[in-house]
Image (tube, rainbow, N blue to C red):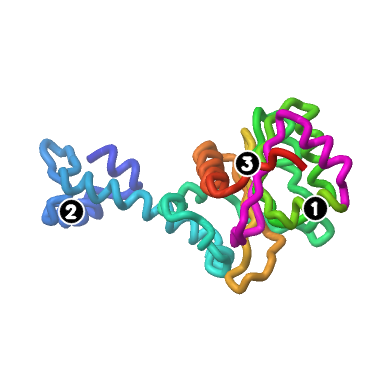
Amino acid sequence: MDALLKSLKTTRQALLPQMKILEEHYLVIHYNDTYELTTIGNLIIGEMMPLLDTVDLFENDIDYWGTHNLSFIPPHLLQCIDKLRKCKVITPHHVDMYKLNEEILETSPISKSHYGIVTFYHPLFLQFISNLISNNVKVHMIVPQSVIDKFETEQSSQFEKIMLSELVHFSVYPEDMGFLGMACNDHYFMMRILKSNGEHDTRYILCNDRAVLEWGKELFEHYQKDSTPITDI
């Protein structure tokens, strides 16, 4: 009881009626001023914690999450979207809205690997990948055919040089992926998603939590299994 009172910052008089309700519903038992979860209590707690974490995620920025499309996330990852609760929604200054993310730019060259999904063309993408190659980073990219076509049209020589590297693995996804893209290295996860009405948004999600990095790699693997590797250009 002393530990409960200290943790909850309350008094015995205020807590005892609440504990009695939990006992009456067979969620806790007590003996010698000690309280313990019942088997039923443990089962409910196991289900409740992910729910509370999911509520925390959406509550932090409900206007963002409520107005954006999440249908591109596969069901098994949507079930554990609570892992993203430590992520921040970044709103770049209008001067920087088209710049590549600084955290990814700084940490990918010092990572062992970089995973990226990009559905739009940016003239600095290939330069960024070249920098990763020079730092011996393994690069795994998934893009639509339209982006490959732009690379071959706008930056053909640089693209050909990059594709000669054994560190680079490009794959083409055959359908609309339903979001703008993601990047994941050994330190950060970043994701750009579309608004519910399909409009683009310059805001993005950023996080450096270990569980989120694993979630991001699983998202990449979900799209990779239906992608076709580029073996020649």
Evaluate whether residue 1 shows in this view. Answer: yes
Q: Is residue 111 above or below residue 176?
A: above
Find out whether residue 37 is within the magenta segment.
no
Task: Say which amino acid is labelled 1.
Answer: His
Specify the label residue 122 is tagged with.
1
Q: Secondary structure at mark 3?
A: strand
The spot of residue 185 in percent (x, y) is 64, 37
Residue that appears at 22% across and 47% down: 43
Residue that appears at 28% across and 38% down: 3
Specify the label residue 184 is tagged with.
3
Judge by depth and name the residue closer to the eye, 15 or 219.
219
Q: Nearer the viewer, mark 3 or mark 2?
A: 3
Measure the alpha-carbon separation of dots 2 and 1. Answer: 57 Å
Check if mark 1's residue and mark 3's residue have beta carbons within 8 Å. no
Specify the label residue 22 is tagged with.
2
- Dot 3 alpha-carbon crowd within 10 angstroms: few under 14, some 14 to 19, many 20 or more: many
Q: Secondary structure at mark 2?
A: helix
Judge by depth and name the residue closer to the eye, 10 or 229.
229
- Dot 2 alpha-carbon crowd within 10 angstroms: few under 14, some 14 to 19, many 20 or more: some
Task: Say which amino acid is labelled 3.
Answer: Cys
Q: Is residue 124 left or right of residue 206?
A: right
The spot of residue 52 in percent (x, y) is 38, 54
Residue that appears at 63% across and 64% down: 194
- Dot 1 alpha-carbon crowd within 10 angstroms: few under 14, some 14 to 19, many 20 or more: some
First-in-chain label (2 vs 1)? 2
Bounds of the magenta segment: 154-183
